[in-house]
Image (cartoon, rainbow, N blue to C red):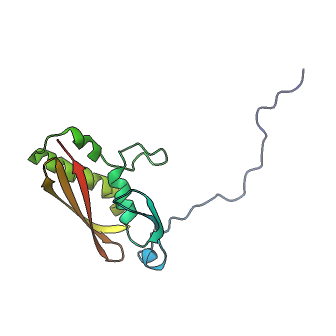
Amino acid sequence: MGKLVLARQYPRQSYPLRLRHCPPDPTFSILRPMDALIDSQTGDYTGTRTYDLHTAVYLRLKTPLASYWADPWLGSRLHELERAKDSATTRRLAQQYAEQALQPLLDDKRATALAVGVSRQQDGWLLLTIVVTQANSAVQTFTHSVKVI
């Protein structure tokens, strides 16, 4: 019988492979566009690039948590509120869910501050007002509607 070879042996490298962690450059968003711009009204790409966190905020609020295969932490739990009654508790949950969804922007140092406000837009709708201070000190305000019962 022949000899069974399970794995080919390769010589080890004489030096260890090191990965350097470089801190994010706060001027990066000033020099180059970061993401493709998504229109928040239609959900379609506009064909242009954005210099701010518009697309990052939009994707984190609109995507259900853990539904994106490449990043299980991308998204929010705001879709769960579609079955909740319009109450003070629901408004607090909406604020917490939005803050949790946007926390990775603070962790990645793409944003330095984040504030979420919730108001009742009309019957059956909550309006989230999100104020994000980017790493380059630019302040952006986003609005996002959430359907409730």
Residue 22 visible in the displayed image: yes
* Relative to 141, 30 lies left or right: right
* Relative to 78, 63 lies left or right: right
Residue 128 position by quadrant: bottom left
Residue at point 49% right, 76% down?
32
1 is higher (above) or lower (below) than 148 = above
Residue at point 38% right, 55% down?
59
Nearest the camera: 143 or 72?
143
Quadrant occupied by the N terminus: top right
| Count of marks overlaid on the render | 0
Residue 7 position by quadrant: top right
Residue at point 68% right, 59% down?
15
Residue at point 77% right, 49% down?
11
Which residue extends farthest left? Answer: 88
Which residue extends farthest right? Answer: 1
- The location of residue 65, given as percent across then percent down, is 35, 45
* Relative to 101, 149 lies left or right: left
- The location of residue 5, given as percent across then percent down, is 81, 31
Nearest the camera: 11 or 35?
35
Residue 108 visible in the displayed image: no
- The location of residue 38, given as percent across then percent down, is 41, 62
